[in-house]
Amino acid sequence: MYLLACLPAYNEEGVIGELIKKITPLVDSVVVCDDGSTDLTSKESQDAGAFVIQHKQNKGKGAALQSLFDFARHSNADVIVTIDGDGQFLPEEIPKLTEDIESGKSDIVIGYRFETEKDMPSYRKIGNKVLDELSKQVSNLNLRDTQSGFRAYSKKAIEKINFKNNGFVADSEILIDASTKDLTISEQHVTVLYNTGTRTSTQNPIRHGGSVLISLLEMVLMKRPLTFLGIPGLIMAVIGIITSSLTLISFNETGYFSIPLTLLSIVLFTVGVMLVLVSGILFSFNRTSKSQ
């Protein structure tokens, strides 16, 4: 089987060249998407023997993956491995991921990182667990590591998967789309290095996590509006009706009219009804999109 390694990279000078040299003996070819780097990422990649796709501007990891997936679709590759260009993953573990693809057991294999999470910074542990839970809510997949960039894909998966997000949430979007297309997904434990001697993140972790969280919340609300908008909205509307009724009963019995309780009941009822209406609109939109 023809094995293609795909590396999204942004300002990975000093790391990317050596990484490609380690990957090359394990695969048939290597392609790098330089996502608008301002350093020598492209030159080091080419010098190491990789084919390089260049973005003139930095668009985000998702955009780099889209370019790599497009390249893979037009290649002769039977198995595709994506691995981040920062050197956190070990190239020698590529066969771990490709084995189930080559045997036909899986369409996608994710490099599961968290058996070594004692080495993971605390903020990453918390952030990844939150993002994993949100991804599970949308995809209905019981995966332990939805944010890992070390993955293997079959040709069938590459041809079927469609994703549009340009940012880091693309990792989740790929799995969500794969789950709707009945692609088989599994996990294999891999080693991850958090102290590589160089910077392994090109974004502020709070900004990165926040942007992914917001995008995932949008997906959750769009995919399951009745669960996450309709039911809470209905509950709020009912509570609003109850509190307004209690206010009227209290006024009839004591003559005292509670303005705070009245305002609370109005807000709860209004917001609740709006949420129910929005959930209905999104639900109808989703059904129409699926039928088309």
Image (spheres, rainbow, N blue to C red):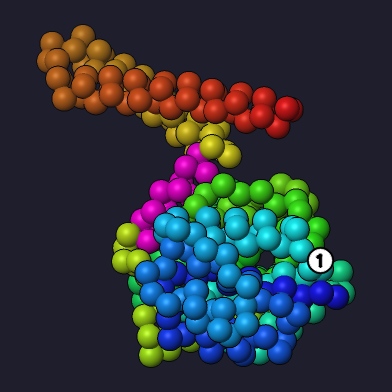
> At 35% across and 25% down in the image, what residue appears?
271
Where residue 97 sits, quadrant-wise, is bottom right
Q: Position of residue 10 (x, y in %)?
A: 44, 69
Residue lying at 32% horizontally and 59% vertically, measured from the top left? 207
Q: Tell me the residue that label 1 is attached to.
A: 76
Helix, strand or loop: magenta stretch: helix
On the picture, is 32 further left or further right than 72? left
Numbered circles on residues, count: 1
Give left or right: position of 35 versus 47: left
In the rendered structure, which amino acid carries the disc numbered 1? Answer: Asn
Where does residue 263 sit, x and y in percent of width and height? 21, 21
Split into 4 quadrants, where in the image is the N terminus?
Answer: bottom right
Answer few, some or many: residues within 10 Å of disc 1's Cα (few below 14, many 20 plus, some between 14 and 19): few
Q: Up-down: is 214 above or below 270?
A: below
Q: Residue at x 76, y 54 (%)?
A: 159
Report if residue 210 lies within the magenta region.
Answer: yes
Is residue 64 at all visible to an observer of this figure?
yes
